[in-house]
Image (cartoon, rainbow, N blue to C red):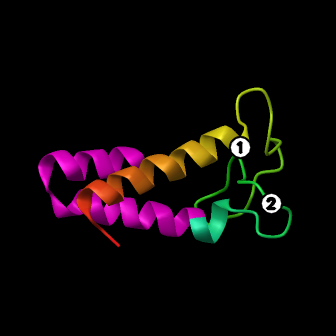
Amino acid sequence: MVGFLNAFEISGQRHFWVAAQRSWEFIERAIVDRKHGEWFWKVSKEGVPSDDKFKVDQWKCPYHNSRTCLEVMARLDRLRVR
């Protein structure tokens, strides 16, 4: 998502903006665990969480999710998108 926003900011090409929006929609729909908190490590294309990975381990922690959101907010602010 951050990469798509970077590409949009640099190029102005709308398909990057659309890809960023679609990424966020998928995260909201399938990645965020609304019942137990945190983001799933991995889900199928259909949004089914994988049971072969823990949500948090030495390679994935809440820092990454928060950092993603902070980066997206900064880019949207620069683009003046509300």
Residue under numbered circle 2: 37
Spot occupied by residue 42 in the image (x, y as percentages of width and height): 68, 48
Pick whichever, 74 or 13, lies toward us: 74
Pick whichever, 7 or 68, lies toward us: 68
At x 58%, y 60%, the residue is: 45
Pick whichever, 60 or 70, lies toward us: 70
Q: In the rendered structure, does residue 46 fall within the stretch colored magenta?
A: no
Q: In the figure, is residue 74 to the left or right of 15? A: right
Q: In the rendered structure, does residue 24 fall within the stretch colored magenta?
A: yes
**First to last magenta residue range:** 1-27
Residue under numbered circle 1: 62
Q: Can residue 52 be seen in this view?
A: yes
At x 61%, y 40%, the residue is: 64
What element does badge 1 sit on? helix
Q: Can residue 1 be seen in this view?
A: no
In the displayed orientation, state which residue is furthest to the top: 58
Question: Counting residues from the N terminus, which is met first, the one under dot 1 or under dot 2?
Answer: 2
Amino acid on which disc 2 is placed = Gly
At x 43%, y 56%, the residue is: 73
At x 75%, y 58%, the residue is: 49
User: Dot 2: few (<14), some (14–19), or many (≥20) neighbours within 10 Å?
Assistant: few
In this rendering, the answer to whether 23 lies above or below 66 is below
Q: In the figure, is residue 14 to the left or right of 4? A: left
